[in-house]
Image: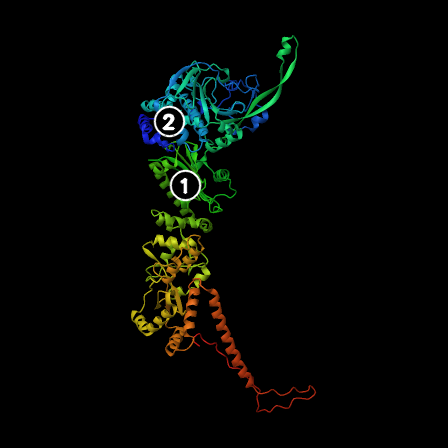
């Protein structure tokens, strides 16, 4: 941690506001060091490969852990080992004789109670420990992530320094991390073969937050960067993350051996103590040739972390892509024969069986982070296999993009478009984007801070070197780095959509839009800054494209020279939209009308408002005006003004007013929405919402409707004549016209049963009239002659008489005005 960061943290910790609330959220950026890339790795690539190769030696197989003796790996175990470990991994099976002090008693502590030097924490550390336990980390399980990251840093530091000083490796050149648990004593032990620490480094690194091994190391690199042909990629050796061990442990011991130190030292502290002890390691159980072992005495509520399955799951989740192999020990027991000491004391030679504890070690981080490789080196099959395994999917992704961002923010990203849309309303956005910091998993639950909600269907990995490990939601909301990352990720997602849209295989984008079109429309409504770019991905059916969707760009290109606006109509389906009366005049002029058939269509264009300088116009609203002969309109209004007033009087509050229409050609009437009212499709959608039908709101929207009549239609002319003559039934005809206009305009009648009754009565009267006319016609026919006998021949025909068929006159159905 830099001095400036340390002073900042100290100021925060001294603040009364920061320590008064146990729920205070401490920003991870206040504690983690942000390291810059100092030199090129390429100059060291060959030296690192030779100096850091994991060759088998006798040092680690003889490592005494719990008085363990590592046994030779069987041939089957070697065959099962991953390729990454074939270069020289430690044995995967270690036997632990169940000696008296660890077999069944389980009461001995891992370190003998040897007295040592007692030191007090720096004042800030005591407060920091309390904040970590209560505030900094929201999940206890992250302690393992932090400790494994520290172990990886120690290995990385050793590998780097060994390129200039090969003696640091000593006789053991394998760089690995081992994790095992002792269920009898409730211990969890994390061991690495890294650089280790000296006595002074223990005191300075773990007794104060103003000092850090890695921070000092990086400082030295910066001061000598011209002479050091390399770089470090370290998160931080024993920074704030180390103290997360106290989330699950009452007591923590750090046993460490530096290659330059002749002695192995132990740092030991308890959770509620304000001091720690430094002593020399004398317990052979934990003597190691090089590196560090962290021994956690687990709390009563943290015994679940003694399960090897639990540990493996956590390592796979958080540390799957650490560059060093991580082995998890599985505790097992077996019966072995040992010499009977009691019989030997009596001079007898005898053996007895004894329970022996042993461990088999399995590597858990076999997968390699393909996003760190060059896109040219990764095949399509590898990308698909990574997607399927990471997200447990069977379908291959539709598309993917792999890129690196450099500049103010540096991060590597691999994004996928899944093969199909999420199933269920809650699946989209859940754990889809995985955030890594230098290959260490941080989180996959960002609630829109890293990716907007409308891109929640995207899946992928983001690996940044510029974020701290303890990333919180508050940090993501306030971090300038995250804002830059978000902007870049959105742009790259749009580029991926655009590549599908421009693909020669049109089926690719059709499949994409079918699955994720609703997310694009949601983005138009939510993302004001990017709605113009999102509009280019929208697709609609139209009056001229009823089988294949068209884009807004294609619509504008096909507009008539005298067309000024983009016209659209909302309906439940293409079939109902193409027969709507609103399109009659537009079709006659050859204007194309977009059909909004999805719930989000109408909402999205209302937020978009314009595309390429053309305004969106809803042809079902009263504000729609196609233009025309104003003098002819005024003449019709003067001629049928009384009829409009009379119909308004008959309908009452059902409509706001009655007007002469310019939009109709063949229909007698239509019901249009008010300027601020719901369209018929929107009203249908709002009715279906649980909270959309606000009391009184629907009635208000109904009162804004406008009833338009086509004065050139015969029904309207007959109704006007019936009104003038005062014929009975004119009132019922006006009501029936309104009900039919509701249906043809897409609205739902308030009383469908009454409407059906009126139609039945009309049908009945028409049938009765037809039947009465038919009876009179039959009565006027001449009576046919009686049938002749077959034996009697017919009389001869007169040449002047011609037999003709008598035809009945066609009975025309009565009009509504009748």
Q: Which of 680 and 271 is in front in this view?
A: 271
Q: Which residue is depicted at the point 36% across and 69% down? A: 648
Circle 2 Cα neighbour tier, 10 Å, few/some/many (<14 / 14–19 / ≥20):
many
Identify the coloring. Answer: rainbow
- Residue under pointer 1: 447
Location of the C terminus by quadrant is bottom left
Q: Which residue is depicted at the point 49% across and 75% down? A: 765
Q: In which image quadrant can residue 39 be found? A: top left
Q: In which image quadrant can residue 652 be found? A: bottom left
Mark drawn on residue 576: none
Outermost left residue: 631
Q: Is residue 798 above or below residue 571?
A: below
Q: Can residue 333 be seen in this view?
A: yes
Judging from the image, what secondary structure is the residue with disc 1 in? loop
Outermost top residue: 347
Q: Is residue 355 above or below residue 810?
A: above
Q: Is residue 407 visible?
A: no
Outermost right residue: 791
Query: Considering only order in the chain, which callout, 1 or 2, is on the residue closer to the N terminus?
Result: 2
Location of the N terminus by quadrant is top left
Q: In which image quadrant can residue 416 be found? A: top left
In percent of width and height, residue 453 lies at 40, 44
Give the Cα separation between the discs numbered 2 and 1.
Answer: 28 Å
Q: Which residue is depicted at the point 59% across and 91% down? A: 799
Q: In this view, does 340 lie above or below 32?
A: above
Mark drawn on residue 128: 2
User: Which label lies toward us, 2 or 1?
Assistant: 2
In percent of width and height, residue 36 lies at 35, 29
In percent of width and height, residue 360 lies at 55, 25
Q: Nearer the viewer, residue 581 or 222?
A: 581
Mark 2 vs 1: CB contact within 8 A: no
């Amino acid at each position: 941690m830099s001095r400036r960061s340390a002073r900042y943290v100290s100021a925060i910790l001294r603040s009364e506001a920061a320590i008064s609330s146990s729920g205070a959220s401490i920003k991870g950026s206040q504690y983690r060091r942000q390291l810059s890339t100092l030199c090129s790795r390429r100059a060291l690539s060959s030296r690192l490969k030779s100096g850091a190769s994991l060759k088998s030696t006798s040092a680690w197989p003889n490592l005494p852990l719990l008085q363990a003796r590592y046994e030779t790996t069987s041939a089957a175990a070697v065959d099962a080992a991953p390729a990454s470990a074939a270069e020289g991994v430690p044995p995967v099976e270690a036997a632990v004789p169940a000696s008296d002090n660890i077999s069944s008693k389980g009461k001995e502590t891992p370190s003998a109670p040897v007295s040592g030097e007692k030191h007090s924490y720096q004042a800030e550390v005591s407060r920091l420990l309390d904040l970590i336990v209560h505030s900094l980390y929201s999940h206890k399980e992250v302690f393992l992530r932090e400790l494994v990251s520290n172990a990886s840093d120690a290995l990385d530091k050793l590998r780097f320094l060994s390129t200039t000083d090969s003696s640091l490796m000593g006789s053991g050149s394998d760089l690995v991390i081992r994790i095992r648990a002792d269920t009898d004593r409730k211990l969890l032990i994390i061991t690495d073969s890294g650089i280790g620490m000296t006595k002074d480094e223990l005191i300075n690194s773990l007794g104060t937050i103003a000092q850090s091994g890695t921070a000092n190391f990086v400082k030295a690199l910066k001061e000598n960067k011209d002479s050091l042909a390399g770089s470090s990629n370290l998160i931080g050796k024993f920074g704030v993350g180390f103290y997360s061990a106290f989330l699950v442990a009452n007591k923590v011991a750090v046993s460490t051996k530096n290659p330059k130190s002749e002695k192995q030292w132990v740092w030991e502290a308890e959770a509620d103590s304000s001091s720690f002890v430094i002593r020399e390691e004398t317990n052979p159980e934990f003597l190691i040739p090089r590196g560090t072992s962290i021994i956690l005495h687990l709390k009563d509520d943290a015994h679940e972390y003694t399960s090897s399955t639990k540990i493996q799951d956590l390592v796979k989740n958080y540390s799957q892509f650490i560059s060093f192999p991580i082995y998890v020990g599985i505790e097992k027991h077996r019966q072995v024969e040992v010499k009977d000491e009691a019989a030997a004391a009596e001079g007898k030679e005898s053996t007895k069986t004894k329970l022996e504890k042993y461990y088999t070690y399995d590597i858990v981080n076999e997968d390699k982070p393909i996003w760190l490789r060059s896109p040219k080196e990764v095949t399509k099959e590898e990308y698909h296999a990574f997607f399927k395994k990471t997200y447990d999917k069977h379908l291959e992704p539709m598309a993917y993009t792999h890129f690196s961002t450099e500049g103010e923010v540096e991060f590597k990203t691999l994004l996928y478009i899944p093969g199909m849309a999420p199933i269920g309303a809650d699946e989209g956005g859940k754990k889809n984007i995985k955030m890594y910091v230098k290959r260490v998993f941080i989180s996959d639950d960002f609630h829109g801070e890293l990716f907007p909600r409308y891109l929640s269907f995207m899946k992928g990995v983001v690996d940044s070197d510029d974020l701290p490990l303890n990333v919180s939601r508050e940090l993501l909301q306030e971090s300038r780095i995250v804002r830059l990352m978000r902007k870049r990720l959105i742009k790259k997602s749009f580029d991926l959509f655009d590549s599908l849209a421009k693909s020669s295989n049109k089926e690719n984008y059709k499949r994409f839009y079918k699955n994720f079109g609703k997310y694009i429309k949601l983005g138009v409504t939510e993302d004001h800054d990017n709605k113009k770019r999102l509009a280019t991905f929208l697709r609609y059916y139209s009056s001229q494209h009823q089988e294949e969707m068209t884009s807004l760009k294609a619509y504008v290109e096909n507009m008539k020279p005298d067309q000024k606006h983009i016209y659209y109509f909302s309906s439940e389906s293409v079939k109902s939209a193409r027969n709507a009366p609103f399109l009659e005049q537009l079709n006659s002029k050859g204007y194309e009308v977009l059909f909004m058939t999805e719930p989000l269509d109408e909402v999205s264009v209302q937020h978009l408002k314009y595309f390429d300088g053309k305004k969106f116009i809803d042809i079902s609203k009263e504000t729609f005006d196609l233009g025309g002969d104003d003098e002819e309109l005024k003449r019709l209004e003067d001629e049928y003004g009384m009829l409009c007033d009379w119909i308004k009087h008959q309908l009452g509050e059902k409509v706001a007013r009655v007007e002469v229409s310019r939009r109709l050609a063949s229909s007698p009437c239509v019901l249009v929405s008010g300027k601020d009212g719901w369209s018929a499709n929107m009203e249908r959608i709002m009715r279906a919402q649980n909270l959309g039908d606000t009391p009184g709101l629907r009635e208000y929207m109904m009162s804004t409707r406008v009833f338009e009549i086509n004065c050139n239609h015969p029904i309207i002319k007959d109704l006007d004549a019936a009104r003038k003559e005062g014929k009975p039934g004119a009132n019922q005809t006006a009501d029936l016209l309104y009900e039919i206009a509701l249906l043809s305009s897409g609205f739902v009648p308030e009383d469908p049963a009454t409407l059906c009754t009126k139609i039945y009565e009309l049908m009945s009267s028409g049938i009765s009239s037809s039947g009465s006319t038919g009876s009179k016609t039959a009565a006027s026919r001449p009576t046919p002659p009686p049938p002749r006998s077959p034996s009697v021949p017919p009389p001869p025909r007169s040449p002047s008489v011609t037999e003709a068929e008598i035809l009945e006159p066609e009975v025309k159905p009565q009009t509504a005005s009748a």
